[in-house]
Image (cartoon, rainbow, N blue to C red):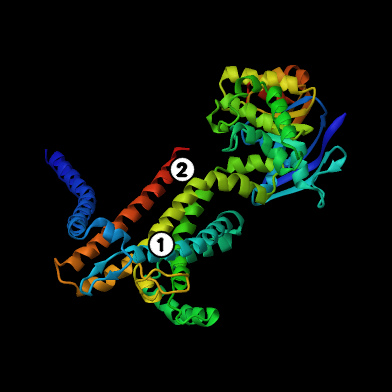
Amino acid sequence: MLRKFRDSVIEKIIFICGILSIVFVVLIFGFLFKEGISFFKEYGIFEFLLGKYWYPTSDPAAYGVLSLIVGSVLVTLGATIIAVPLGIMTALYISEIAPKGIRDVLKSLVELMAAIPSVVIGFVGMVTLVPLVKALFNVPTGLTAFSGSIMLAFMAMPTIVSISEDAIRSVPWQYKEGAYALGATKWQTIRRIVLKAAMPGIIAAVMLGIGRVIGETMAVMMITGNAAHIPSSIFEPVRTLTATIAAEMGETVKGGLHYKALFGIGLVLFSITFIINFIADLFLNKNKKR
Amino acid sequence: MDIIEIKNLNLFYTNFHAIKDVNMKIKANKITALIGPSGCGKSTLLRTLNRINDTIEGVRIEGDVIVNGKNIYDPDADVDRIRRNVGMVFQRPNPFPLSIYNNVAFGLQINRLVSRKDETDFIVKESLEDVQLWDDLKDKLKMSGLELSLEQQQRLCIARLIAVKPEIILLDEPCSSLDPMATAHIEELMQELKSKYTIVIVTHNMQQAARISDETGYMLLGKLIEFDATGKIFTNPSKQETDDYVSGRFG
């Protein structure tokens, strides 16, 4: 009797823990949605999404997030262009080419890289990369979208490397053996068989890497210059969606229009990362089914 | 005519002596079977014939394997060319995660054997015809090779080999994951292929060896105990160990 009772109590506790994470996500989303929607009603969703000017403290205030979206997209795109080829090649090296000793060292280094706090990455970038970019490209300030892209690429790399490495390593040995038995060289086998078989996993890795970059706040706030305007090149300062929320949330009146506008930004960010994670999930599932 | 000659072959997995002093001559356009209990080294021996053991870490090989007069273990031997000439079919069908067409064309493309699309088309058709898949699949060439039945997958793997025109085909228990009907079909196919290719097959199924092969080698604990005409091995072997195994007293 007692055993049964204990069993059902433990089962309930586990159930509550499991359901809590769902409840939290729903609550966060609900809260974002409530504040965001009330802002859209007051200000207008198109004025918000397509407005070029973000002047929350002017009179009259303007809450156009287009420049912030462009800033986020630009930095993310730059980071992706740098991190994806580097990450995939690192993953290939670790799983296919490196001898065992080097492989283990590299793997732990990549995992260590994931553990560096973003504020540290931002700080290191600020004192090393920013002056370098300023001198190298002869621009008025080194706090640019370009600098941000480079530092964020470092943050996306560990995710891309470790997940693609898993995907590449889980390609059945028989595929490779079959290719070798037909006289394929190592590189031909990697390019035509291994990469092809691992592709869904690699795409998922890239998506999760992008998700990490787009949500990143601290490092971009420190490096990208935070100027809310639409840049004409990547060597100009930009401001991202995340940095705007972080920088301004402390200075708004709770319940005011500016406060609600920041929730609107949160909603935009949430939608973007939701879509990216959803795509990553699609590919990960596709990988499992095979 | 002997197409393969194995001389004093020894193989070690790190410290394990897996093949001990094997000497063997394999005749062209015959089916040669290797039988023996699990772990006797028959698959390992087969895998030395196209140097696919090289891809496993810790393998050391001593001795010579002479194919068409050339030692494939010469330091300056062209491994990729050897593997193209000595094709291999594995225990589990392993078509690539590509379309049927690209599975067959893979060997042609990587070895740059053909340059024109219509030549590739022709060889793909010819190879699929040789394994009797063409009629069933000619309208589904874009379908993934992984969607076929196991028997069809194994046929596809054979077609993929035939496309690069090897002289020798090695089969490593090719029917172990197939049902009896499919096994019979693959055995029929081997009989047809014999006229064009030399076939070496490893099997743990003694009846299969007796049915299809011309010559049979019996292996035990890394040694080639006896190698002779299949009829002799199964009815009147000269060694006691062979007799124990083929009569079912051991193994």
User: Tag 1: residue type?
Assistant: Val
Task: For the residues labelled 2 and 1, say whether their Cβ atoms are less than 8 Å apart.
Answer: no
Query: Can the viewer see residue B187?
Result: yes
- On the image, the x and y values in percent for residue B170 come to 71, 33
- On the image, the x and y values in percent for residue B126 come to 72, 26
Q: Chain of mark 1?
A: A
With A129 as the anchor, is A46 left or right in this view?
Answer: left
Looking at marks 2 and 1 on the same chain, the residue that comes earlier in the sequence is marked by: 1
Which residue is identified by label 2?
A287
Query: Can the viewer see residue B49?
Result: no
Q: Chain of mark 2?
A: A
The answer to whether B186 is drawn above or below residue A182 in the figure is above
- On the image, the x and y values in percent for residue A176 come to 62, 44
Residue depicted at 44% across the width and 74% down the height: A236
Which residue is identified by label 1?
A73
The answer to whether A154 is drawn above or below residue B38 in the figure is below
Residue depicted at 53% across the width and 78% down the height: A137
Residue depicted at 69% across the width and 30% down the height: B124
Residues indicated by labels 2 and 1 sit on the same polypeptide chain? yes
Q: Nearer the viewer, mark 2 or mark 1?
A: 1
Closest to the observer, A234 or A28: A234
With B15 as the anchor, is A143 left or right in this view?
Answer: left
With A166 as the anchor, is B246 left or right in this view?
Answer: right
Within 10 Å of the Cα at label 1, are there few (<14), some (14-19), or many (20+) other Cα atoms? some
Give the residue at the far front of this rendering: A60
The answer to whether A236 is drawn above or below residue A284 in the figure is below
Which corner quadrant holds the N terminus of chain A? top left
